[in-house]
Image: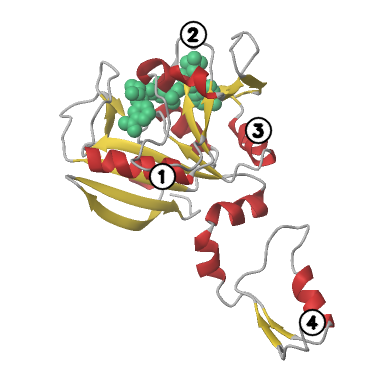
Amino acid sequence: VLASGVRRVVVGALDPDGRVAGRGAERLRRAGLEVATGVAQEEVEALDPGYFHHRRTGRPRVTWKAGLTLDGQVAAADGSARWLTGPEARRDGHRLRAEADAVLVGAGTVIADDPALTVRLPDYEGPQPRPVIVAGHRTLPGAAQLWERGPLVFAPDDSGGYPAEVVVLPGPGGVDLEAACDHLGELDVLDVLVEGGPAIAASLLERGLVDRGVFYLAARLAGGTGVPVLPGVFPTVGAARPVEVVGVERVGADVRIEFEFTGEAG
Ligand SMILES: NC(=O)c1ccc[n+]([C@@H]2O[C@H](COP(=O)([O-])OP(=O)(O)OC[C@H]3O[C@@H](n4cnc5c(N)ncnc54)[C@H](OP(=O)(O)O)[C@@H]3O)[C@@H](O)[C@H]2O)c1
């Protein structure tokens, strides 16, 4: 390196992976080079946020996606949710899937929607995210499309007899979601997209396991309560959790809002 005349090395961001952190820079310093580190930390982390999150926490970065009416309903009272949003918003949702290593849904969504959770974009040839199902005490339908896709199933017990890799992790409300996130981290899953429904989203939120949200606000009013985006009661204004809105965009007739959790209490 010295022979080539290089004397100063500039490092955008150090790798937070404990196995390598700072060692490369140290070796360069020992070799007599001047090394500046972390000069573009934010910009570099924005290129692969899931990687940095995973290396720091051991868990994947969790994105919660939902399509909802302007008055906050993700499905009608009969359980149907197809389609609240327009084709452009749904296409954008497929792009989110393409960026994820895994797409996670709860039993309620498998039963109500029988989703395929594949990336369906013209000309897309990249990898498909692995489906992850959080099963509960009801038995999942044997004819669900997801069985064809080699899903990973987290279940509270081993009574389901599912044709899939099942990891039994009993916990509050069914599956222990913290342990599930740890398990995904151990599998080197960096980015998880949570596609519902409200019960799983609420449990993940309660445990502080959601890192960002992408909501597609459909240009529609439900006009009543079907399935609200989150279950439960909103007791006082003070209970509302603050988020930082990091993006607002029109997608066709709908609006896409991206937000991150600030870590502050309500
Ligand atoms: N518009 C959208 O973006 C969107 C997205 C997804 C779903 N949806 C709609 O949402 C509705 C389904 O909602 P949902 O809340 O019933 O479905 P869900 O959140 O997908 O599944 C909830 C179920 O997961 C199981 N579970 C296991 N461990 C759990 C834990 N720790 N915490 C919470 N649940 C756990 C339980 O199954 P058991 O009851 O069997 O124990 C629970 O009832 C459908 O109408 C669907 O169309 C809308």
Q: CA distance from mark 1 to mark 3?
A: 24 Å
- At 45% from the left and 14% from the top, the residue drawn is 144
Whichever of callouts 2 and 1 sits on the residue coming sooner in the sequence is: 1
Residues at marks 2 and 1, CA–CA distance in whole angstroms: 28 Å
The amino acid marked with disc number 3 is Ala
- Image coordinates of residue 76 in percent, x first then y, are 24, 22
Kindly report the distance in space between the C-alpha atoms of the residues bearing marks 3 and 4.
Answer: 40 Å
Q: Position of residue 223 (x, y in %)?
A: 15, 29
Q: Is residue 204 left or right of residue 161?
A: left
- Residue 24: image quadrant is bottom right
Please state which of the two labelled residues, at mark 1 or mark 3, is closer to the viewer: 1
Residue hosting label 1: 96
Q: Name the amino acid type tagged 4.
A: Arg
**Disc 2 designates what residue?**
142
Residue 31 is drawn in which quadrant?
A: bottom right
Residue behind mark 4:
29
Counting from the top left corner in percent of width and height, residue 128 is at: 49, 36
Q: What amino acid is at disc 2?
A: Gly
Ligand 1 shows up in the quarter that is top left
For the residues marked 1 and 4, what is the alpha-carbon distance in whole angstroms?
40 Å
Q: Which mark is residue 180?
A: none
Asked whether mark 3 lies closer than 8 Å to ligand 1, one says: no
